[in-house]
Structures are given as structure tokens and as C-alpha cells.
């Protein structure tokens, strides 16, 4: 009967006291069986012994000649070790033996034959002088021919108590470790604790190691490397260092081979320790150092470098979240990168483990690999390093990946075009992926330069696609034929670019191109008789990911048609799936969530209700005031705007899930997106609808639906909805929600703990309410945030938005001294930033808000003079600030300050306004707001002086006009020319307006230096 599993080391099968044994040991010579011979002598002897036992009618044998049915188990050694043997040999685990299980007719007795053998596959010879000599395999090993292998047959009768009801009772299974014997290698049946104890016993040996012990070191290194546990690298390195120590102390039998080094490098690279890759690199450098000192030491091989590279590339995946904010180490990392080549080894040491540093370390080792004499680099080595850069998601990831691709192309062209260095489709797809992630990093920083970088990254990705198409058409090279992954990666690059106007159009064109190419391939396939298996693998047919990428482009654009376009794509996917049954294009949960997100960002108002951007006294409170009540799920539907359509998409998901489609189950992301659509709609009753959805989610979670459990983000959306509602009770409702979050958190629900976003939304509510003392209330909330943060709660760290919102609340208030309050908050913000809170870095919006508080200062002339002094001082600091630079909003706001706080005959007005406008023209920030405020506060003569050739009639009056090209626009008369002035910034010189970003329409005025030159 075949036994399953292994028995624990040092244990024996339970047997009876009756033991049958042969009178003498059977000695035999091992004979090599010729081809065609059926059985060896040991097999015949075993059968003779079984027949001698008698009455065998059903026999099951497990012999070493049948590997598929052999059952190894561990037994104590037959004889004690000699006194000359080391103390470690006596404590070594016993050798594996093989059992011959014989079933007889008698149900009460079972014979077990245990054959102890010493074969070269399972136990090395222990004598110091004896070595193996395998001429067939070319190994230079000796063997003591006088020493012969011996086998002892020991027959035991199992205790009859193991039998129950005529059947053999199975023994308890031994403890097994993760993995199988084939994956864990030697000592596969050992637990981690047993392997650790055995390793420590071996390392504790103080005497010189013999060859058997040295061989055990190598086997243990391999076993630790295959375990892939946290302490694999530590234990494997200890074993290697012991072998090196034996070598250095004069043990000629000890030789740290390249395989040993590579095994330890693998152990460190795969153990999961964050410092594992750096430790693996240290082992590789130790190997290089010892080989440079003595050529007799092991020479670093290609696989050693490849193992270290693989460790660094894998570490880039889990190091992104842990150290992605370590800007200082990255800056130092970039400065070190520009060092000379002789400092290359220093670049490979002492790096903090970040995604960017991991990719650079992998690139450093790849360059070292290219300097080996044989230069055995392969295209897959380059692809792995390029993918490491692609996973970094930094602004330079695309550039670095493309540089490595250029190195690969140069290596391919400089070595007579070897096939193993030929760039393939994976190489180009990886670079496209890197550019897409580079665009994503730019989108996370929503400033002008970063948006331009995102667009350039997407254009770079598309240029590589065009190059692949061109080379495939020219040379018909299948390795360069773009596939579905290629086109989808370009779509993702445009989706991550953050561009509002170009990206949707380009994504639609690429998707249509994929559909055309797919139709052409289908026609070619129908006309040919070849198999379609290869075509299915290389197909460029748009799948769910491709359509989802285009929907994401529209969702991020914020365009008014984004919701409509996204719904159209979703409907197309459903239609194709219903007609063809192709599951590769079946809409999934991400498709519906992206459409809802697009509807939320489109902001199309309802056609049946008015927007509540103003402060209506009773908006959102009446349940029947122009609002349709939905009969389903207690949700109040608001007209047919974006919010209503988002609710309709949610109902489609719920219907599909109710029909049995488990992939269409709405989750918390779905409901949060719907509530976000309501919050951004600013429609009547939207805030109340969002809060009712939140209450419904709480009820569903109480019933056991864990995937719709509300979190802090859910509550923050509803608070934001009340902030956008303009309701007179918005502040009270927001305060109630925040208190609910606090109560749930104190009851143990950590998912709804109020965070910075929660308090910022609450600050926004108070900054937009018309209640008295709202500014003071907002400032008290900010003080609460500061106290919580200073007490150790980092989740409520005040940021720039927190301070800006409170300053904005003061600027809208009618209280006296608000200019002084705004300046005081600005100083507190600067101190907060200098103390280490990088999120509180003053930005241009903070300065604009302080200037706005000064511009709308009420009171006597003395208070206005003080506010003017604060505005001039703050504007001067902005121009010299290390944090930010003035934009068209700050220039327009400061001109508003001059118009509101300075009288007409003020001698300071003309030189101050002239200086500000000239500086604005120099910075390229003359927008429509700047132009309008300038016209309102200056006389026609000063306007003629400032506009120069663009102003004709310097006398003003009804005939005054501004001419640009062939267009003549009338300007009203009077000191301010307030009513008739209709000229826009588009009529002015481009160098005056080249850096203006119109936030309203998400429009970038073409930059003077924004043209992208060159091509890939």
C-alpha cells in the first residue's frame, strides 16, 4: 500500500516488538544494467525475499527503480558514527530510505521491508579522502573502489493494532511546509524552524569542515533561497560567509563557487526584505572584489548580475507606496547620477529604497553586465530594466526607459545585429507604458508646466506607435507589429495626460483606427485558409480595457459632452457584446464607474430645475418644490442633467446585477461617484439626495453588504454637496455629518475617521454661508485642526487649502479688520510650512485671497489705507517669493485693490498701476480680467500710454477705439470707459498673454515656447 507524504525526521513507523531479520547482511555489488535488461540483482533479491516470506497474493512494491511510486521516509542510522567523525555528523538528519510494503491474505499482519541504501543521489560519502569520479558526466571526482555500497534488509511486522475493520489505519500526516518537494529542493519536508535549527547546528561547528559539511552548506543555501521567506537572505549569507572563512583559513576543500554566490544573491532578491536588493548587490560586489584580488576566486557570471537586477526590478513595485514622498533622497539621487564613471560603484551603495532608486540601481547593474568580457546581455534584460522605470510613475520614467531602449538599439547595431539583442515588441510597448505613467505623474500636479509635460508624454507614446507602424509596413517585421497592448498603452497615456481638449479627440481617433485595422484583419482571415489562433493572440481588436481608457479620457476632460460621449461608448460596448457574445469587450464594473465619473465631471445642469449657485433661502429643503420623487430606493431624481443620468447608470448596474451578472455589482466606488455627481451638479435638492444615498448605504451595510460600507470619503462628498448647495441650513447639516463621523469613529469604526478633507469641506461650507460670524467659526475649526495635528493626529494636518478657505471666509465677511486677519493667517501659514508641514506651502491662490480681502475692506479711509499697505507689501512678497509667481488672477486682484482703495487724485496711483501692468505684460499674464480692471481704474490718457500702438484715440470719448489687425472695437467714454469696452486678451500681442491659463474653460493660451520640436 502506497504511503502518502513524508514522516518527520528522526521518527519511526510504529511497529510491534516482533522483528524478523536475516541472519547475515546481504552484500552485493552494484552492477550497471545494460540497455534492454529488465531487472537488476537487487530487484531480484527483493522479490526472492518477498516470496520467502510466503503466501503473498497481492503485493505493492516501492523501490528506488520505480521513482513514480517510491516512498521515502527517514529512520535513524543503523550504526553509530566513529569517534573520528565530527560532532555535527552525529547530529545530521538521517538518510532517506525506501519501504517495500507487502499486503498478504492475512488481515492481521502486514510485512514491511525497509531497504537502507547509500546511493550517490541521496547521500554523499562521508570519508574525508573519498571522492566521486563520474567520468560520464565529465566531473573530476575520485572514488574509493574498495568501498562498496551495502544494503540491509530489515523486516518488521506492523502491530496488529494499526488495523481496524480489516483496513490499515493511516498515520498522522507529517508537518509540511509551503510548496512541493520539486520547488523547495533539498530538505523539502523540513519546517522553517527545523531548517533554521539544522543550519545553526552546522554553523556552530568550530572544527574545520570536511567535504560533506561543505556540501551541506551549499544544499542549505539552495534550500533557503527556494523558501523565499523573510530570513532566507540572512541564513544563506551566513552559510556563504562560513565557506569563505573556511577558504581564507586554509581549508583547500572549501571553494565559494559562482553558483553559491548566485544562490545567496537570489535568496536576498526574493526574500521580501526591503533591503534585500541592496544586500544582493553587496554580495555581488564582494564577489567582484575577491575575484579582483585573486583570479583563482570565482568570477562573476551573467546570472549573478541578472539575479541582482531582478531583485531591484521587483523591489520597485512595493517601494512606490512606502517611500514615494522622499523627495530629498531623490534629489540626492539625481545629483549623484551626474558623477563620473569612476564613481559608478558609489552610486550603487547607500540608496534609500524608492521606486526611482531601484530602477536606477537595476540600470547601473545592466551597464556593468555589458562590461563583462563575454557581454552576454539579452534583450529580456533590457526589457526588465525598462519595465522597472515604467513602474516608477515619475516625471522622468518615460525618458529613462527610452534611453535604455536607445542603448539596446546601439548594442544591436554595434554587434553585427545579434538576434538576442534585437528590440522586440515588448521593448517598445514597455517604453510606451513608461511614457503613460510619466504623464500620470504630471497629472497629479495640476500646474501649467506639469500639464504640458503630460501632453508631451502622451505625444511621445504616440510617436513610438507611429514608428512601429512605419517599420512594420516598410520591413514587414512581425516583432514590430503593434498589437492590442500597444494601442491600449497609448490610449492610457492620453488618459493620464490630464489634457482637456486634445486628449479626447486623439483617443477617439486611435480607437476608431483599432476598429478599422481589426476589420481589415478579419477580411484577410476570411480570404485565407490559415489558422486564426495566431491572429487571436496578435489581434488589435479593441477590448474592454481600450474602451475604458477612452471613457477615462472623457471623464478627466471635464468637457460638457464628456458624459454623453462616455455613455455612447458604454452603449456601443453593450451592443457589440450582445450581438457577438465576445466576452473580451463586455462592460465591467470599471466601465460603469468611469461613465458615472464622466457624468460627475461634465457638470451638465438639469433642464427642469434652476442651478443653485446662488444662495436660495429654501433650496434643497422642500421635498416637492419642483423636484420629482423617484419610487425606487428612496432617491429623489433631479431633472435630466448629469446627476440624473448618473442615477440612471446606477439603476442599469443594479438591474444587471439583479439579473445574475455578478460582475455588475455596485460597490462603494459606484455610489461615491453618484454622490459626487450630485455634489457637483449644484442642482436643487442635490445635497439632500446625496445624503439619502449615504443613509441607504448605512442600512445596506447593517444588513451585511460589506462592499458598500461608507467610508470617510463618502461623508466628505455629502458635506461637499451641502457646501455647493447654497442652502441656509448647509452649515448645520455639515456640522451634523461631521459629528456623526466622530461618534462612529469613537465607537470603533476607523473607516469614517474625520480627516483633512473632512475639515476642509466643513471650512468650505462656512466660507460660503451668509451667517454672521462665519469667518470666526471657520478660523476656530482651523485652530482645532492645528491642535489635533500638534497632538499627534497626522490625518487632520492642515494644508494650503485649509488656510486659503479661512482667508476666503474673512475676505467675504463684513467685519472690520479682515485685511489684518488675512495677513495674520498668511504669516501663520508660512510658519507652519517652515516648521515642516510641506502641505502648507503658500501658493498663488493664498496671495490672491489675501489681496482680495484687502480689496473689499470696509470702513473709513484710515482702515483702507492700512489695507492698501498690506496689499502692497503682500504683492511685493509674491513677486520675490520662492514658493510661487504672480499669475493673471493676482495681477487683476491687485488692480482691483488700487481701484477700490485709492482715490482718483492719488499721486501714487498712476506709477503703481503702470508698474504693475508693465510687469504683467513682461510675465505674459495679461488676461481678460486684467484688461477689464485696467480699463475701469485708469484714464484714457494712461490707457493710451500703457497700450501703445493698440490704442488710437488718446482723447477718449465715443470715438476712442482699440485696433488690432482689421478689427476695430468701440470703447466707452469717461474716466473708466466702463460700459463700452469689449476688447479681449486675444486682441493683444501674444507675448503679453502667452502664460495665461483660463481656468473657466480649462483653456491654455498657446505658450510662447510650448511648441514641441523634433520627433522620436
Image (spheres, grey):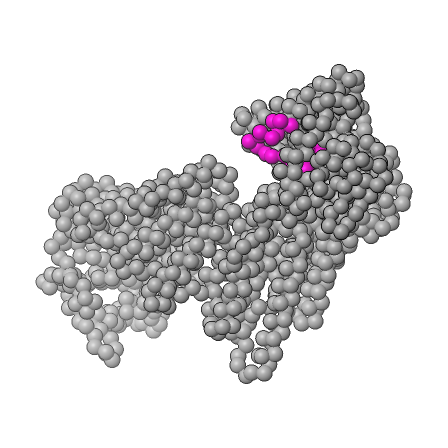
Q: Position of residue 331 (x, y in %)?
A: 45, 39
* Residue 877 is a magenta residue: yes
Name the side, left or right, on which 890 lies relative to 324.
right
x 66%, y 61%: residue: 508
Horizontal arrangement in the rendering, residue 94 relative to residue 951 (left or right)? left
Give percent across and percent down for residue 15.
31, 55
The image position of residue 276, as x and y in percent, is: 38, 45
Is 792 or 883 nearer to us in this picture? 883
Specify whether residue 729 is in view. no
Per the image, is 970 magenta? no
Residue 554 placement, left or right of 293 = right
Query: What is the residue that sits farthest to the right in this orientation?
Result: 625
Instruction: Name the image quarter holding residue 237.
Output: top left
Viewer-side residue, 618 vs 439? 439
Name the residue: 33% across, 65% down: 415
Q: Quadrant of residue 750?
A: top right
Left or right, 61 with reference to 459: left
Q: Quadrant of the N terminus?
A: bottom left
* Magenta residues, dominant SS class: helix
Who is closer to the viewer here, 481 or 2? 481
Q: Residue furthest top?
A: 862
Residue 601 at what x, y percent from top left?
A: 71, 48
Q: Residue at x 81, y 33 (%)?
A: 976
Q: Residue at x 13, y 45 (%)?
A: 250
Asked whether residue 829 is in view, the answer is yes
Q: Count the marks: how many?
A: 0
Which span of residues is magenta-colored?
A: 875-894
Amino acid at each position: 500500500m502506497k504511503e502518502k507524504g513524508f514522516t518527520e525526521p528522526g521518527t519511526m513507523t510504529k511497529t510491534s516488538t516482533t522483528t524478523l531479520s536475516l541472519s547475515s547482511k546481504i552484500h552485493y555489488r552494484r552492477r550497471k544494467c545494460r540497455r534492454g535488461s529488465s531487472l537488476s540483482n537487487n530487484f531480484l533479491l527483493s522479490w526472492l525475499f518477498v516470496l520467502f516470506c510466503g503466501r503473498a497474493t497481492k503485493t505493492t512494491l516501492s523501490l528506488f527503480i520505480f521513482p513514480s511510486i517510491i516512498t521515502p521516509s527517514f529512520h535513524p542510522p543503523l550504526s553509530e558514527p566513529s569517534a573520528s567523525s565530527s560532532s555535527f555528523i552525529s547530529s545530521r538528519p538521517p538518510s532517506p530510505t525506501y519501504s517495500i510494503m507487502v499486503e498478504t491474505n492475512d488481515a492481521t499482519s502486514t510485512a514491511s521491508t525497509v531497504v537502507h541504501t547509500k546511493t550517490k543521489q541521496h547521500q554523499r560519502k562521508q570519508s574525508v579522502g573519498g571522492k566521486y569520479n563520474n567520468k560520464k558526466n565529465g566531473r573530476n571526482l575520485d572514488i574509493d573502489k574498495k568501498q562498496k555500497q551495502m544494503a540491509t534488509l530489515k523486516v518488521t511486522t506492523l502491530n496488529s493494532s494499526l488495523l481496524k475493520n480489516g483496513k490499515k489505519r493511516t498515520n498522522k500526516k507529517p508537518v509540511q511546509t509551503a510548496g512541493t518537494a520539486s520547488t523547495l529542493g533539498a530538505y523539502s519536508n523540513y519546517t522553517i524552524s527545523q531548517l533554521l535549527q539544522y543550519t545553526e547546528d552546522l554553523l556552530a561547528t568550530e572544527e574545520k569542515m570536511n567535504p560533506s559539511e561543505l556540501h551541506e552548506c551549499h544544499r542549505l543555501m539552495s534550500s533557503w533561497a527556494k523558501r523565499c521567506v523573510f530570513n532566507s537572505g540572512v541564513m544563506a549569507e551566513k552559510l556563504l560567509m562560513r565557506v569563505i572563512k573556511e577558504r581564507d583559513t586554509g581549508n583547500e576543500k572549501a571553494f565559494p563557487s559562482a553558483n553559491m554566490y548566485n544562490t545567496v544573491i537570489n535568496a536576498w532578491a526574493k526574500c521580501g526584505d526591503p533591503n534585500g536588493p541592496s544586500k544582493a548587490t553587496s554580495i555581488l560586489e564582494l564577489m567582484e572584489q575577491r575575484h579582483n584580488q585573486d583570479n583563482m576566486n570565482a568570477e562573476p557570471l551573467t546570472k549573478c548580475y541578472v539575479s541582482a537586477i531582478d531583485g531591484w526590478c521587483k523591489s520597485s513595485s512595493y517601494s512606490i507606496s512606502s517611500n514615494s514622498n522622499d523627495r530629498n533622497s531623490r534629489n540626492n539621487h539625481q545629483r549623484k547620477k551626474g558623477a563620473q564613471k569612476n564613481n559608478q560603484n558609489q552610486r550603487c551603495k547607500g540608496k534609500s529604497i524608492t521606486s526611482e532608486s531601484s530602477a536606477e540601481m537595476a540600470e547601473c547593474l545592466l551597464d556593468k553586465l555589458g562590461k563583462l568580457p563575454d557581454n552576454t546581455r539579452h534583450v529580456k534584460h533590457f526589457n526588465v530594466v525598462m519595465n522597472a522605470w515604467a513602474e516608477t510613475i515619475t516625471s522622468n520614467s518615460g525618458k529613462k526607459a527610452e534611453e535604455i531602449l536607445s542603448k539596446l538599439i546601439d548594442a544591436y547595431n554595434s554587434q553585427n545585429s545579434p538576434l538576442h539583442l534585437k528590440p522586440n515588441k515588448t521593448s517598445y510597448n514597455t517604453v510606451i507604458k513608461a511614457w503613460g505613467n510619466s504623464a500620470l505623474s504630471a497629472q497629479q500636479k495640476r500646474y501649467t508646466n506639469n500639464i504640458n509635460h503630460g501632453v508631451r508624454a502622451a505625444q511621445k507614446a504616440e510617436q513610438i506607435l507611429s514608428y512601429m507602424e512605419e517599420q512594420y509596413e516598410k520591413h514587414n517585421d512581425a516583432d514590430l507589429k503593434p498589437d492590442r497592448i500597444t494601442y491600449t498603452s497609448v490610449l492610457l497615456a492620453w488618459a493620464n495626460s490630464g489634457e482637456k481638449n486634445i486628449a479626447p479627440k486623439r483617443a477617439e481617433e486611435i480607437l476608431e483606427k483599432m476598429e478599422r485595422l481589426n476589420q481589415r484583419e478579419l477580411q484577410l482571415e476570411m480570404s485565407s485558409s490559415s489558422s486564426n489562433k495566431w491572429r487571436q493572440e496578435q489581434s488589435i481588436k479593441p477590448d474592454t480595457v481600450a474602451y475604458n481608457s477612452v471613457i477615462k479620457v472623457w471623464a478627466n476632460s471635464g468637457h460638457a459632452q464628456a458624459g454623453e460621449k462616455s455613455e455612447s461608448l458604454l452603449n456601443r460596448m453593450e451592443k457589440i457584446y450582445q450581438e457577438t457574445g465576445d466576452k473580451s469587450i463586455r462592460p465591467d464594473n470599471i466601465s460603469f464607474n468611469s461613465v458615472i465619473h464622466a457624468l460627475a465631471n461634465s457638470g451638465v445642469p438639469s433642464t427642469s430645475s434652476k442651478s443653485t449657485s446662488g444662495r436660495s433661502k429654501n433650496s434643497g429643503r422642500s421635498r416637492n418644490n419642483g423636484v420629482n420623487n423617484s419610487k425606487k430606493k428612496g432617491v429623489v431624481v433631479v431633472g435630466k442633467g448629469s446627476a440624473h443620468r448618473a442615477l440612471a447608470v446606477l439603476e442599469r448596474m443594479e438591474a444587471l446585477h439583479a439579473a445574475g451578472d455578478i460582475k455588475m455589482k455596485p460597490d462603494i466606488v459606484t455610489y461615491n461617484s453618484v454622490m459626487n455627481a450630485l455634489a457637483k451638479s449644484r442642482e436643487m435638492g442635490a445635497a439632500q439626495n446625496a445624503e439619502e444615498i449615504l443613509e441607504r448605504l448605512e442600512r445596506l451595510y447593517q444588513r451585511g453588504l460589506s462592499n458598500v460600507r461608507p467610508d470617510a470619503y463618502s461623508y466628505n462628498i455629502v458635506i461637499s454637496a451641502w457646501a455647493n448647495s447654497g442652502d441656509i441650513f448647509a452649515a448645520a447639516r455639515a456640522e451634523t455629518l461631521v459629528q456623526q463621523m466622530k461618534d462612529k469613529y469613537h465607537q470603533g469604526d476607523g473607516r469614517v475617521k474625520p480627516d483633512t478633507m473632512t475639515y476642509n469641506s466643513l471650512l468650505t461650507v462656512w466660507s460660503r454661508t451668509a451667517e454672521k460670524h462665519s469667518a470666526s467659526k471657520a478660523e476656530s475649526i482651523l485652530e482645532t485642526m492645528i491642535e489635533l495635528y500638534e497632538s499627534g493626529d497626522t490625518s487632520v494636518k492642515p494644508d494650503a487649502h485649509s488656510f486659503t478657505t479661512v482667508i476666503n471666509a474673512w475676505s467675504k465677511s463684513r467685519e472690520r479688520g479682515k485685511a489684518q486677519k488675512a495677513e495674520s493667517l498668511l504669516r501663520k501659514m508660512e510658519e507652519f510650512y517652515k516648521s515642516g508641514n510641506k502641505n502648507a506651502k503658500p501658493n498663488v491662490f493664498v496671495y490672491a485671497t489675501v489681496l482680495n480681502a484687502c480689496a473689499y475692506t470696509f470702513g473709513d479711509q484710515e482702515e483702507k489705507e492700512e489695507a492698501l499697505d498690506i496689499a502692497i507689501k503682500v504683492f511685493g512678497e509674491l513677486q520675490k517669493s520662492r514658493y510661487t509667481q504672480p499669475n493673471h488672477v493676482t495681477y487683476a486682484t491687485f488692480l482691483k485693490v488700487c481701484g477700490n482703495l485709492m482715490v482718483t487724485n492719488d499721486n501714487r496711483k498712476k506709477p503703481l498701476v503702470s508698474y504693475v501692468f508693465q510687469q504683467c505684460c513682461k510675465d505674459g499674464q495679461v488676461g481678460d480680467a486684467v484688461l477689464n480692471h485696467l480699463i475701469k481704474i485708469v484714464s484714457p490718457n494712461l490707457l493710451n500710454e500703457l497700450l501703445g500702438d493698440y490704442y488710437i484715440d488718446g482723447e477718449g470719448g465715443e470715438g476712442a477705439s482699440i485696433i488690432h489687425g482689421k478689427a476695430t472695437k468701440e470703447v466707452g467714454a469717461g474716466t473708466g470707459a466702463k460700459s463700452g469696452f469689449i476688447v479681449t486678451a486675444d486682441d493683444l500681442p501674444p507675448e503679453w498673454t502667452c502664460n495665461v491659463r483660463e481656468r473657466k474653460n480649462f483653456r491654455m493660451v498657446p505658450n510662447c515656447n510650448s511648441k514641441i520640436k523634433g520627433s522620436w
